[in-house]
Amino acid sequence: MANFSNMMKQAQELQGRMQQMQAELVDLECKGTSGAGLVTVTLNGKGDMTGLDVDASLIKPEEAEILEDLVVAAHTDAKSKLEAMVQEKMKSVTGDLPIPPGMKLF
């Protein structure tokens, strides 16, 4: 029975750490770039786009399609960096608890 009590205590601690991490994610910021830095996308920790910076040299009507592609590429870059950052934070929260691959706790 002591094992079960210990396991429940660990689960409660994990839940508390997860709630704290979720609150911290809002303040997390990640930037992704494309076009050799001509387009930059900023995401918050939840993956919402909070900023977009486009170099003035790209703002030409005849190059709209290129600009659209660069924005998508910058967003993809930021999203992958953000996912890596969140995974690192998750490791610090879960400690030694084995979490199945692909399982999302938030």
Image (cartoon, grey):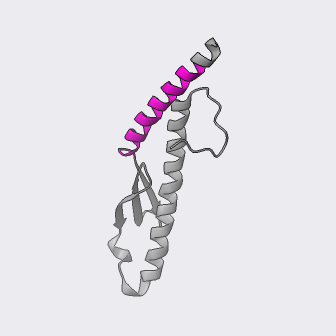
The residue sitting at 47% across, 62% down in the picture is 75
Furthest-front residue in view? Answer: 1
Residue nearer the viewer, 11 or 48: 11
Q: Position of residue 87 (x, y in %)?
A: 55, 41
The residue sitting at 46% across, 30% down in the picture is 17
Furthest-bottom residue in view? Answer: 62
Furthest-left residue in view? Answer: 56
Q: Position of residue 91 (x, y in %)?
A: 56, 34
Q: Position of residue 5 (x, y in %)?
A: 58, 17
> Is residue 68 rendered to the left or right of residue 3?
left
> Is residue 79 rendered to the left or right of residue 56?
right
| 87 to 34, vertically: above or below | above
Q: Report the number of discs.
A: 0
Q: Position of residue 42 (x, y in %)?
A: 39, 57
Q: Magenta region's main secondary structure?
A: helix
| 30 to 40, vertically: above or below | above
Residue nearer the viewer, 20 or 28: 20
Q: In the picture, residue 19 is in which quadrant?
A: top left
Q: In the picture, residue 80 is in which quadrant?
A: bottom right
The residue sitting at 43% across, 83% down in the picture is 63
The stretch of residues the image draws in magenta is 6-28
Q: In the picture, residue 104 is in which quadrant?
A: top right
Residue nearer the viewer, 61 or 3: 3
Whether residue 9 is in magenta: the answer is yes
> Is residue 26 rendered to the left or right of residue 84?
left
| 95 to 6, vertically: above or below | below
Whether residue 20 is in magenta: the answer is yes
Question: Which corner quadrant holds the N terminus?
Answer: top right
